[in-house]
Image (spheres, rainbow, N blue to C red):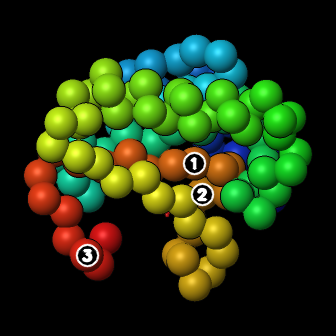
Amino acid sequence: MSADGCLFCAILRGDIPADVVHRADGFLAFRDITPKAPVHVLVIPERHVASLDEVGGLTADERSAMLVFIAEVARREGLVDDGYRVTTNHGPNALQSVFHLHWHVMGGATLSHSM
Ligand code: AMP
């Protein structure tokens, strides 16, 4: 799916409200609307790419900054000492439901192996 009609692009524009926890350097972090962990934050690049399969659509600088941003969000959420999980879903077998690359940052409790 292109940026047209993309839910997360609408959040980036401010057209749809979100509980934003951090925004910097071309990335946004906001709380998942149906959290699967006590802390469940989504990290997205401002530039629309549909999933990790299209990560080549980001520059090399954006790709490396994205990892730094994810780690910064986890640190800001107080997840470093007890630990956290970062996942991304691509395609139907992974049950991807929003087609704008996003990273689930989850923690705040011991996570299930099945999450
Ligand atoms: P995925 O299934 O990996 O594509 O993840 C999409 C995630 O987006 C799900 O965990 C949803 O709960 C979350 N989500 C959907 N709509 C919103 C929204 N408006 N604000 C925050 N999170 C959302």
Could you say where residue 39 lies in the image, as x and y percent from the top left?
A: 23, 42
Residue at the disc numbered 1: 102
Q: Which mark is residue 113?
A: 3
Of the two numbered discs 1 and 2 in the rendering, the one whose residue sits closer to the viewer? 1
Task: Look at label 1 and name its amino acid.
Answer: His
What's the mark number on residue 98?
2
Which quarter of the figure has residue 114?
bottom left
Judged from the image, the secondary structure of the residue bearing numbered disc 1 is loop
Amino acid type, residue under disc 3 in the picture:
His
* For residue 95, side relative to residue 81 (left or right): right
Residue 1 visible: yes
What residue do we see at 58% from left, 21% from top?
Answer: 14
- The residue tagged with tag 3: helix, strand or loop? loop
Above/below status of 76 relative to 98: above
The residue mark sitting in front, 2 or 3, is: 3
Q: Who's the residue at 66% across and 74% down the image? A: 91
The numbered mark at residue 39 is none
What amino acid does circle 2 point to?
Val
